Image (cartoon, rainbow, N blue to C red):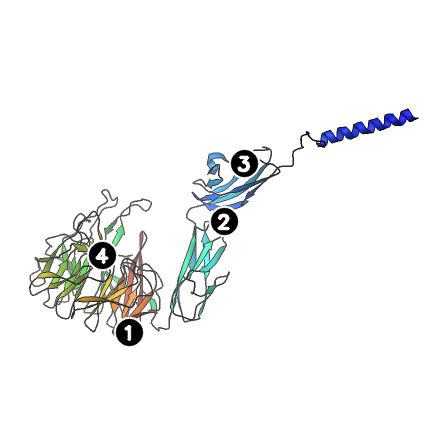
Amino acid sequence: MKARNAASLGFLILLIAMFMAASGCGGGGSTLPSQVTVSITPLTADLVEGATQTFTATVTGSANTAVAWKVQEGAAGGTITSAGLYTTPNSTGTFHVIATSQADSSKTATATITVSSTSASVAITPASVTLAPSGTQTFTVTVQGLANTDVTWTVQEAAGGSVSNTGFYSAPSVTGFFHVVATSIADATFSGSATITVTTSSGRFTPTGDMQNQRGFHTATLLSTGKVLVAGGAMLASQPASPIVCYGGISTAELYDPVSGSFTTTAGMAKQRFAHTATLLLTGKVLVIGGVGNIGSQCEDGNAPVESSAELYDPSSGSFTSTGSMAKARSGHTATLLANGKVLIVGGTDESFVAGVKTAELYDALMGMFSSSGSLSTPRSGHTATLLANGKVLIAGGIDRTNPNSPAATSKAELYDPTTGTFTPTNNMTIARDGHTATLLATGRVLIAGGADLPSAEIYDPATGSFSPTGDMGQARASHTATLLSNGTVLMAGGSDSTAELYDPFTGSFSPTGGMATGRTRHSATLLQNGKVLVAGSVRGRSFVASAELYK
């Protein structure tokens, strides 16, 4: 009996020893591997063609946390680096990124990617709105080209009011320009914005008839009949998908009738032109000079021909006729009607479309001829020219083209004296400017505003020949318009956005007024005989705008 018990006890001890050996107890034994798992973040992604997304993988149950990355569909589904940076293919569809544990290749995790077209867009409606302080507006958003159409709403400015997650906006109690932004949750590189003008001004823009043609870089001239002649403008000469952007001129012209609020076609110019000038003569005819001509349809050499030709529009016949040519081809020049009825043409770029023109010419309407008249101290284009009350002309700013290889905005200014036919330097502006405006005020001083996306403004005083700062605009502007209104204030409009503001010469300050329905740059603004301002056309990326609005 004792022998049997001893045998049982020995067998039990053997089982315990075997268990301890298997479990690693007693030292020197190996551990059983734990369960390896792999997870991936994010699990899903909505991207567009050519976009990137970084994925991260987490491995548990092993000291080796490395993974191998691959795209399930191979090269057709995009690429991914060893760091998890995924690049979508140039095609739409659903694709998969897989992370595989290097410790246990049977353990994987998969993320699903939906790739949409690069034509994805986010647009807010309305695109611009004018509100009173503390006013409200509900915005809606349209998302195209993305599977996930959800957006996040924000206000760009810290003190610009608030917006709910449904697009309900509440304006602040102060006036100013603010922006509501909707950003795609699927791809934050896609967003849309709306511009809000908060103002106490009663001035507003209202739609009027569209032009017959889309235009930008055109001219608009108030005729003695009260109608407005709109002439020329640019057209895209390169193919829409081409990386090269070049424009050619158009020859069409049209008339705006304030009574009917509509545009009608009139006879076209003999030459195609943009960046030209149009000047109302004392005879009632309109002198059209220079500009960039016809570049063709393919932009073979990347350069556009610059015109030296000129033509006259006769409102009585509704037609253009050629007149004498300038001695120098010019675009981006200025043309100023002098008190003696002659027209002073200054600066610009020449046939190369790069080098600046230093010379000036006079057009004699009685003779129909041009003659040279002095030279600038600085060759420039995109400058301003303002006829002063003393008969002299203030030339200010623009692009200094002394060295065509490194053109730059300039602060230099000079005066043209028609009695001597010469230019003399005057004091410099407080800052270099191009794409600015210059407006002769009722006081005889000149308001210089904006340019190179600047909000600043300054005043030129002919009595002292000096510039001094005045109040800043509420919005940086370039290639905008400035229109002297009948009450002495100056309407500043556009410059790549839809906002507008008024300059008060008595207070030396700017204040917001009602905004336009559309953002505009390189447009025209014309004070009509009824006191309203006609704003027409615009450059919009690689396209142009036909719409027009009236400010009152």
Instruction: Kindly identify which residue carries mark 1.
Output: 507
Q: Label 2 amino acid?
A: Ala
User: Between residues 142 and 415, which one lies in front from this camera angle?
Assistant: 415
Q: Position of residue 267 (x, y in %)?
A: 20, 59
Q: Earlier in the sequence, mark 3 or mark 1?
A: 3
Q: Residues within 10 Å of mark 1 (few under 14, many from 20)?
A: few
Q: Are marks 2 and 1 in contact (CB under 8 Å)?
A: no
Dots 3, 4 in contact, CB < 8 A? no
The Cα–Cα distance between marks 3 and 1, rounded to whole angstroms, is 68 Å
Q: Earlier in the sequence, mark 2 or mark 4?
A: 2
Work out whether mark 3 precedes mark 2 in sequence or the reverse, and give the earlier one: 3
State the CA–CA distance, disc 2 to disc 1. Answer: 53 Å
Q: Residue at x 44, y 70 (%)?
A: 135
Residue picked out by circle 4: 232
The number of numbered discs placed on residues in the rendered structure image is 4
Mark earlier in primary sequence (2, 1): 2
**Mark 4 belongs to which amino acid?**
Gly
Nearer to us of marks 3 and 4 is 3
Depth order, front residue of 39/543 = 39
Residue under the image location 87 percent in, 26 percent down: 6
- Relative image position of residue 213 (x, y in whole percent): 28, 57
- List the residue tagged with mark 3: 67
Q: Residue at x 48, y 36 (%)?
A: 82
C-alpha gap between disc 4 and disc 1 = 38 Å
Q: Residues within 10 Å of mark 2 (few under 14, many from 20)?
A: some
Of the residues tagged 4 and 1, which is closer to the observer? Answer: 1
Q: Give whichever of discs 3 and 4 has the lower sequence position.
A: 3
